[in-house]
Image (cartoon, grey):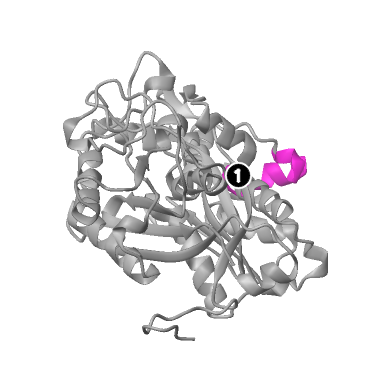
Amino acid sequence: MVAPGGVRRLNDRDRIVITGVGLTAPNGNNLLEYRTHLVNVKSCIRKFNVRFMGDVIAGVCDFDPLKYQKKKDLRRGTRAGSTSIYSCQEAVADAGLDLASIDRSRVGIFIGITEHGNVDTEKQIYEISQFNYDTKFVSHHYNPRIVANNPAGEVTLNMGITGPHYTLGAACAGGNMGLIQGCQMLKLDEVDVALGGGVSETIHAFGAFASFRSEGALAAHEDPEKACRPFDRDRNGVVVSEGGCIFVLERLDAALARSARIYGEVVGYAMNSDALDFILPDSGGQARCMSLALRKAGLSPDAISIINTHATGTPQGDPQECKAIRQVFGDNPRAYINNTKCMIGHTMGAAAALELAGNLPSFQDRVVHPTINVDHLDPDCAFDTLVLNKARKVDKVDYILKNAFGMLGINSTVIVKRFER
C-alpha cells in the first residue's frame, strides 16, 4: 500500500515483530533479571581460570543447561549448543508459543556466531597430548561438535524443529545478523516463525584471550567489574564473555491473531563492509551502515531515541564509532547514547542480540540504562546525551538503534520501533 505523499505503508503481513526473548548473560538468565541488573548497574564480570592463561577477566554465564537437556546430551554436545538450546527454549516459552500445535517445518533457527569449533579443537588437542598425541584418542563426537551449524543444529534435535537451521559467521555482528536473517526469511515466506539472535562460548578456549593479549587489546584492572570501560580515557581493552540471546520473530498478523505480547517492531537494518583492515574499524563504513538502516526504515536521524553502541573499550575502536555517530547524527544528537558491554563484557557473537534485548524494555519503562566505569570521559567520545553511571528516565522512547561491528570490517545496524497499531 502507498500512503498519501508516496510513502509505502506496510500491511500487517509485511511487518516483523519481536514476541519472545530468551537469554543468558553474565548478569542474568532471563530478560527481567538481566534488565534489572543493567538499570541498577550490577556487573558480574569476574576472574576466570583459562588453560595456559591462568586467571583472566571474563563474563561467565551460570544458566542451568539441565533445565532443557539431559546429562548425556551435555556429554555429546557443546557449550554453544547448550547456550542456544537454553535461549531458544526460553524465547519460545516467553512468546507463549506451543510448538506442539504449530507446523515445526515452518520454524527456522538463525544463530549468529563469532566462531565455532575452537573450544572443542583446543580440548581435543589437549586430551591427546596426554597420550603422546595418539589420534586414536580423538572423540568420535568431535566432528558433529565442530561443524559450523552445530549451535543451531543442536536446537533442532532438542526441540524437534524441522525447518531450516544454520549459523551465520559475522564476527561480533553475529547477533544482529541472526535477527536480520530471521526477518528476511519471514519476508520471503520461507518460515512462519524465526528464532534469530546469537551465541558465544568463546571464554572456554584460551585462543581468544591469548590473541587479544598479543594485540595489546585484552582488558586488565585490579577490580574485574571495572575492567570494561567504554569511552573512558583509561580504557585498555576487551573483556571476553560468553552468552546467548534469541528472539522469536513473527509477522505482525500472526502475532495479533494469537494476541501475543510485542516487544517491538523491526523496521530497519543494514550490513556492509569496510574492506580496509583485518582488525581496525573504519568510521566511514560504520556511518554508511547506520545511514543505510535509517534510509530503509524511512527515518531521519533525529527520530532515534536510543543509540546502543558497539564500543568494546579499546583505545582505537571507541573513537571510531563516536566519529561515525557524529557523521550521521551530528555533534549533538537527540538520541540518548549508552553501552551495555561495560556490565557484561563483550559476548562476541551474542553481543548485538543481548545488548538490544537489554534496551527493549525502555519502550515501556522509558528508562535508559547507563554506561558505567567512565571515570574520565575521553573527549573524543563525549556527547551531551551520553548516559553515564546512572540510569536516566526520559519522556519517550520510540526507536532504538543497535550497532554491532566486527573483525574483517563487517558492520551491522538494526532499528527497532516501539510497537503501535
Name the spot of residue 420 as percent of width and height, x first.
57, 63
Front-lying residue, 106 or 334: 334
Specify the principal SS of the magenta part.
Answer: helix
Quadrant of the image occupied by residue 192: bottom right
Residue 31 part of the magenta-drawn span: no
Image quadrant where one finds the C terminus = bottom right
Which quarter of the picture shows residue 376?
top left
Residue shown at 33% from the left, 28% from the top: 229
* Residue 82 position in % (x across, y down): 64, 45
51 relative position to 250: left or right: left
Q: Is residue 279 above or below residue 267?
A: above
The vertical placement of 336 against 313, above or below, is below
The region drawn magenta spans: 65-81
Residue 29 seen: no
For the question of whether residue 275 can be seen, the reply is yes
Whether 10 is drawn above or below 111: the answer is below
Residue that extends furthest to the right in the rendered view of this protein: 101
Amino acid type at circle 1 is Leu
Assign a secondary structure to mark 1.
strand
Q: Position of residue 243 (x, y in %)?
A: 53, 41
- In this rendered view, identify the residue nearer to me: 408 or 391: 391
Q: Which residue matches tag 1?
A: 23
